[in-house]
Image (spheres, helix red, strand yellow):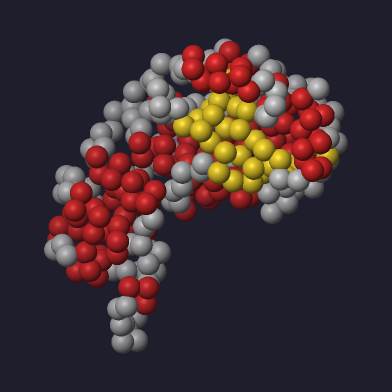
Amino acid sequence: METESRTHTAPKSPTNALPERTGGRDREPGAPGLGGLGAYLKNRRDRVTPADVGLRTYGSTRRVPGLRREELAQLAGVSAGYYTRLEQGQAGTASPQVLDALAQVLRLDDVETLHLHNLARHQGRSRLVRPRPESPHPRVLSLLTALGEAAPAVVLGRRGDVLAWNRTGHALTAAHVDFDAPGDPARRPSVPRMFFLDPLTRDLFTNWDALARAHVAYLRLTAGRYPTDARLAELIGELVMHSDRFAGLWAAGDVADCTVGTMRLRHPAVGGLDVDYQVWLQPESPDHRLEVYTPNDAASADALRLLAL
């Protein structure tokens, strides 16, 4: 969906400050619902119908939206009792072969299958650990410096915090935020927070809804990789409490590794832009992503040149 452009006169404010709630209902504080192997299996099972996998139902009344547990178990070649215990978190972990068989029946893509394996690998780990603040690798910073202002670029951390950016990247994506904020871990802009809790950021993107889905899907993939990350759990809990849209997307359970895509912006300084983002992964710090933006048309290229001045 597209958001209407509005003129804002609000002063710059820290991205850690919470605006008013965006939803119409209150939520009780509590666990953010990161979900585990069983919850993910049930979520995906509900999405596959008998017709999808060639099963005939003979007109019988069904109480589940998708496959029954015993149907999935039979198609995957495991016992119904074992699969039930697996979904209920009572069977320990599962072998890679069993997970691959389940993924095939559930019609998971490569990223979703990876997420399934991540969840199984970390099954039973519930103690949260608070990681140290992230630091961008010196080679990433050198690359960012070498880019200059030729292309907007942002270095993102594991949870979507901005670890560094060039001036064009800052001007394109978050001009209302202090340029030096990424240098202080306590003030670092959080892209997910800005996306769901900051009206200025929401109004910036005309394809906000598609980008919002991508952000949530990537956060869920990250949660599968790092289920004990206390900072990530707090971020997701905060967004679930303060954004109904985030809560709905999170409950959907989608997973994606968003490395390329299109951003359509209605920028307050240079007008409309149509740009692609490309993510460059960093071997020395695989949790960090260098996101570079390139124009899709001549007008967008001109607008980026204006932002670089």
Residue at horizontal 72%, vertical 31%? Answer: 172
Q: Residue 270, position in %: x, y?
A: 83, 35
Q: Residue 168, position in %: x, y?
A: 71, 25
Q: Residue 235, position in %: x, y?
A: 49, 31
The residue nearer to you, when weighing 192 against 112, is 112
Horizontal side of 48 relative to 79 (left or right) equals: right
The residue nearer to you, when weighing 134 against 276, is 276
Image height check: is 87 above or below 126?
below
Horizontal side of 280 relative to 107 (left or right) equals: right
Residue at horizontal 19%, vertical 53%? Answer: 97
Q: Quadrant of the C terminus?
A: top right
The answer to whether one can see residue 62 in this image is: no
Q: Residue 20, position in %: x, y?
A: 67, 34
Q: How many marks?
A: 0
Horizontal side of 63 relative to 189 (left or right) equals: left
Quadrant of the rendered image containing residue 98: bottom left
Residue at horizontal 56%, vertical 25%? Answer: 155
Image height check: is 284 above or below 247?
above
Q: Quadrant of the N terminus?
A: bottom right
The residue nearer to you, when weighing 288 against 27, is 288
Quadrant of the rendered image containing residue 272: top right
The answer to whether one can see residue 222 in this image is: yes
